[in-house]
Image (cartoon, helix red, strand yellow):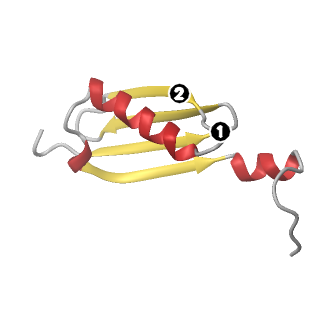
Amino acid sequence: MNDESYRLGCDIGGTFTDFVLVNDETGEFEINKCLTTPADPSDAVEEGIRGLLERTPGFMPHIDEIIHGTTLVINAIIERKGAKTAL
C-alpha cells in the first residue's frame, strides 16, 4: 500500500452522510453511508471514516485529496432554522 494514493469524498446531508473512497492507482472504490448527527455532524463523519477503515485498513496516510460537501446550511435557510442574523 505504500505507493497507493486515495481520494476521500464526504457529503453531509440533512438525513445521511455519504462517503466514497477512491484508490487512484486501481480505480477501486468503497462507499459508506451513515445517519447524519444534527447535534454534531462531525460524529457522523468520524463514524463513516471508521467504517471505511474497517474495509480498507491503512488508507489514511495515503489520502491525497479530501472533497467535502454539505447541504446543512442551505437546508437551514430553506427551513428558516438557526439564529436570526442580518446581512
Q: Going 51% across and 26% down the picture, which residue do you hit?
A: 33
Query: Which quarter of the figure is the C terminus placed in?
Result: bottom right
Task: Estimate the x, y position of residue 12 in percent, counting from the top left.
Answer: 59, 41
Mark 2 secondary-structure assignment: strand
Task: Estimate the x, y position of residue 64 in percent, counting from the top left.
Answer: 30, 54
Depth check: give the residue in front, 43 or 26: 43
Q: Is residue 74 left or right of residue 58?
A: right
Q: Is residue 74 left or right of residue 51?
A: right
Q: Is residue 43 left or right of residue 53?
A: right
Q: Going 58% across and 45% down the picture, which residue do you hit?
A: 40
Depth check: give the residue in front, 64 or 81: 81
Task: Estimate the x, y position of residue 14 in percent, counting from the top left.
Answer: 70, 37
Question: Which mark is drawn over residue 58?
Answer: none
Q: Going 78% across and 45% down the picture, which residue do you hit?
A: 75
Report how far apart the C-alphas of labels 1 and 2 lie in the structure: 10 Å
Question: Which mark is drawn over residue 13?
Answer: 1
Query: How many numbered circles does the render carry?
Result: 2
Identify whether 32 is placed above or below 78. above
Q: Which residue is mark 2?
A: 34
